[in-house]
Amino acid sequence: MLTSRIVSVTGLLGPILGLGASEQLQAQATAANFLMIVNSARANGMGGCVVTMVSEESAHYNPASIGLLHLDRAVSFVAPHSTKWIPELADDMRLKSWSASVGVSRKLPEKSGPGQDQISLGLAYSYTRLNYESFERTSETGAIADQYEFYDAASCLAVGFGWQHKVRIGFGYAIKFIDSRLGEFGAGMDAGSGNADGTAHQFGLIVALPLHEMTASGEPRSDAPTGKTEIEVTPTFACVFDNLGKDLEYVDAAQSDKLPKMRRFGLSMLVAVVSGSKEYCSIRGSLESDKLLVEHAQDEMKEGVEIGILGAFFARRGLMELDGTRRRLSTYGLGFRLRGLLQRATQDSAGDEDRGFGAYLARHFDLTVDYAKYGSQDDNSLSKTWFYAISMSL
């Protein structure tokens, strides 16, 4: 059970999360429900499909992706961004997040064939906070005596391992430190303060199968432009078990609240047209099944598509199931990747790639800008919510 202040906040979380009537009751039986929200602009453009995504933004959602990201990147950073949450219902609620990661990779001692066999290790930190409201207590003279902010926040430390030997496999673990402030400090004589701290654990696996590399010969692959046009097909599977941990105690152990334990399964298929190691166009389709691991919870299905031109310009469309029924929310998104343009601009041969600074940047440096928006629906409080993200990697 929760204090009156916590009840008022968790009562709002039902529509915040876009849950149906049955899951609103389940949401109020759990705490820190903000952990279920996806604050990734790229993923939200594709209906919230996030677990198969390997990008700078994915560190908070699947730690296994960190290993794959750092097969060819040393550092990544997602600039702090702020989403105005449920703008149709609230004016001052903000969902904020940022992340950073570092990693190392090493080629395996065997003779490298297609895909450059190697292993990697990545470490990441991410921070997410959902601000609810501020509260001021005034004295008898009208002066402000105390001021409180009510919020949920989580700091996440993650480690991911990547292995590339024709197939690409990543697995990872993350721990989240939860800071929930839903009540006043030292409120009266009641037990507890409406605040709680806790930890949650996350485990992830991701497997990508680049069929063009798996069926290629074992001879070392040259990255020099050949002019040959190929169609590359890469299916990816991922699973994540999230928010595993002990109950949060706002008042006492007898009235503790469960974490929103979740299971996410994802499948995506990437088809790209490549010529001379340069990508001309691509299409990615994604499906994801999310399940809140509480009694009677239903699977929520998500689906999305991403179309890319020149590896630099992207358009996205998705559908998000809100409550385990057929009621859907449409999503839209756009994206830009500088890396796609850099790869096309540099024409260094394989023999010169280690000496050319431009070629080095083309292989490693990336600047990404993503935007997404939930579709307008009069009967949904999530309508017109929009997201953005700016990320960099090297």
Image (cartoon, rainbow, N blue to C red):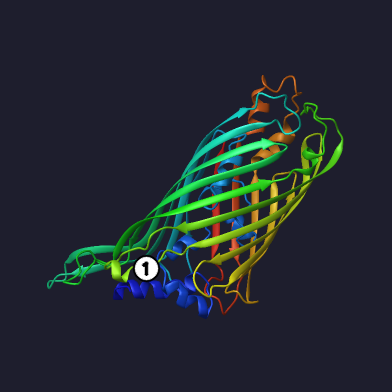
The spot of residue 53 in percent (x, y) is: 62, 50
Q: Residue at x 27, y 67 (%)?
A: 252
The spot of residue 109 in percent (x, y) is: 66, 23
* Location of the N terminus (image quadrant): bottom left
Q: Horizontally, is 308 left or right of 1 in the view?
A: right
The spot of residue 144 in percent (x, y) is: 19, 65
Q: Residue at x 35, y 75 (%)?
A: 8
Q: Residue at x 50, y 57 (%)?
A: 242
Q: Horizontally, is 37 left or right of 109 in the view?
A: left
* Location of the C terminus (image quadrant): top right
Instruction: Evaluate whether residue 324 shows in this view.
Output: yes
Q: Is residue 224 above or below residue 54?
A: above
In the rendered picture of this protein, how many numbered marks are placed on residues? Answer: 1
Instruction: Evaluate whether residue 51 shows in this view.
Output: no
Pointer 1 local density, CA inside 10 Å: few below 14, some 14–19, many at least 20:
many
Residue sticking out furthest to the right: 228
Q: Amino acid at mark 1?
A: Asp
Secondary structure beneath dot 1 equals loop
Q: Residue at x 60, y 72 (%)?
A: 376
Q: Horizontally, is 183 left or right of 222 in the view?
A: left
Using the rendered view, name the quadrant where residue 351 is placed: top right
Q: Is residue 56 above or below residue 95?
A: above
Front residue of 134 and 285: 285
Q: Give the residue number, with chain letter if any, for mark 1.
A: 257
